[in-house]
Image (tube, helix red, strand yellow):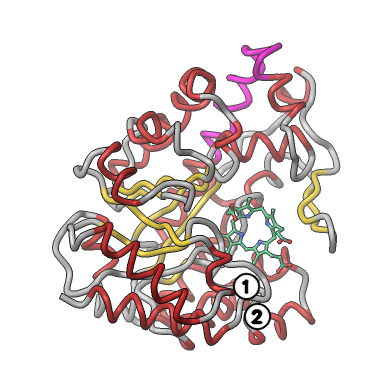
């Protein structure tokens, strides 16, 4: 690997400057991405290895980033389980046959690795094009966040149906999360064997839970996913938002890196989870819309809080937003370089 700052930081080894990449770094804020999306639906892009590889490379060609993330979506593994996934223009993802009853859980299919051929092919093509310039990150949704889409049938505000199953039918809930965990492991193992250098598990919406409920209904499943992936020997990042009160429990799931959102101060959160785990974050994505001096000030602040300690990966606290000014993204990366070069 020509640039392995990111992988070193995942392992808390010293680096010459803080590695930086952005969640959703390939996306609608880039004209190059929009040109592809004008001709192809989101699912087509994800499932056509040439297109997925091309889109993955777009931010790498344009910016001085320290990692690529394979272009895909966390909801893809739900399809071979038997759930019908579509994306609607305003609404985002929709599951046409959501999981609500015992029968719905029972009929969900186990998935073999062959079902994810599109994903391993995309990884292979992307690594060929990257030629070792930067590491490639694979990813999957975490069992809870996937369950929330499977049960609600799409995005949700209060997770009413999800919690209804969790609190009312814990047996059904745990059976569903076990099935989802198995698929997540298969999907990630497939990406790892195809050549991704690290994986991130997105538990984007887990912040809607209390620590007690997280501990009982979610943690055992995330732990089982991480335990099964550990022998693969590559760094595992575990990320969620709205997680300030959950972080110590999330830490105990056993990932190498914990993702932090912007509701916490990086130094305080890192001290709380312990400096024996790497952290990734945590600029508010909306800060990238602010004037450059304000972006600079806030990036410097995060890097000051990381204090040159080994094991910090600079990122946003959540995905980059559509309409983010591209020149601000470029400047932000420059500010990370400016304030973190040792
Ligand atoms: O980081 C990257 O560059 C890789 C790309 C990536 C996508 N989805 C492509 C995508 C990643 C990491 C994801 C993960 C994902 N997908 C998550 C977890 C991350 C997060 O943001 O919390 C979630 C919750 C999903 C489900 C999903 N997919 C939603 C809610 C949406 C609609 C969002 C919207 O703003 O419309 C999608 C569609 C999607 N997946 C887009 C992208 C770039 C945007 C839609 C498009 O191009 O039409």
Mark 2 close to ligand 1, CB under 8 Å: yes
Residue 274 coordinates in the image, percent (x, y): 23, 39
Residue 33: numbered disc: 2
Q: Residue placed at 79% from the left, 40% from the top?
A: 153
Number of marks in picture: 2
Mark 1 close to ligand 1, CB under 8 Å: yes
Reply above or below: 180 against 44.
Answer: above
Q: Residue placed at 18% from the left, 63% from the top?
A: 308
Residue 167 coordinates in the image, percent (x, y): 66, 14
Q: Are marks 1 and 2 in contact (CB under 8 Å)?
A: yes
| Dominant SS type (magenta) | helix
Q: Which residue position is annotated with label 1? A: 27
Quarter that holds the N terminus: bottom left
Q: Earlier in the sequence, mark 1 or mark 2?
A: 1
Residue toward you, 129 or 172: 172
Mark 2 packing: few (<14 Cα in 10 Å), some, or many (20+)? Answer: some
Residue toward you, 160 or 244: 244
Callout 2: helix, strand or loop?
A: helix
Callout 1: helix, strand or loop?
A: loop
- Choose top left, top right, bottom left or bottom right for residue 210: top right
Mark 1 packing: few (<14 Cα in 10 Å), some, or many (20+)? Answer: many
In reply to whether residue 95 is colored magenta, the answer given is no
Quadrant in which ligand 1 is drawn: bottom right
Q: Which residues are magenta?
A: 166-183
């Amino acid at each position: 690997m020509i640039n392995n700052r990111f992988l070193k930081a995942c392992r808390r080894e010293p680096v010459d400057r803080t590695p930086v990449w952005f969640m959703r770094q390939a996306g609608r804020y880039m004209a190059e991405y929009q040109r592809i999306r004008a001709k192809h639906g989101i699912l087509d892009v994800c499932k056509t290895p040439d297109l997925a590889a091309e889109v993955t490379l777009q931010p790498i060609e344009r910016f001085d980033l320290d990692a690529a993330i394979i272009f895909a979506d966390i909801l893809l593994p739900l399809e071979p389980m038997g759930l019908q996934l579509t994306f609607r223009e305003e609404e985002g993802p929709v599951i046409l046959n959501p999981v609500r009853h015992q029968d719905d859980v029972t009929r969900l299919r186990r998935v073999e690795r062959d079902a994810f051929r599109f994903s391993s092919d995309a990884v292979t093509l992307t690594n060929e094009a990257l030629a070792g310039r930067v590491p490639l990150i694979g990813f999957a949704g975490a069992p809870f966040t996937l369950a929330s889409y499977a049960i609600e049938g799409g995005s949700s505000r209060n997770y009413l149906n999800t919690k209804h199953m969790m609190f009312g039918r814990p047996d059904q809930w745990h059976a569903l999360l076990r099935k989802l965990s198995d698929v997540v492991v298969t999907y990630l193992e497939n990406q790892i064997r195809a050549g991704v250098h690290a994986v991130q598990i997105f538990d984007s919406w887990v912040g809607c839970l209390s620590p007690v409920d997280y501990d009982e209904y979610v943690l055992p499943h995330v732990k089982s996913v991480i335990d099964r992936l550990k022998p693969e020997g590559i760094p595992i990042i575990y990320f969620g938002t709205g997680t300030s009160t959950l972080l110590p429990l999330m830490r105990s799931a056993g990932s190498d890196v914990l993702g932090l959102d912007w509701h916490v101060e990086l130094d305080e959160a890192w001290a709380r989870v312990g400096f024996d785990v790497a952290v990734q974050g945590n600029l508010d994505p909306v800060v990238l819309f602010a004037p450059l001096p304000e972006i600079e000030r806030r990036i410097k602040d995060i890097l000051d809080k990381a204090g040159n300690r080994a094991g910090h990966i600079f990122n946003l606290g959540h995905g980059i937003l559509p309409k983010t000014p591209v020149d601000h993204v470029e400047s932000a990366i420059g500010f990370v370089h400016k304030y973190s070069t040792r």
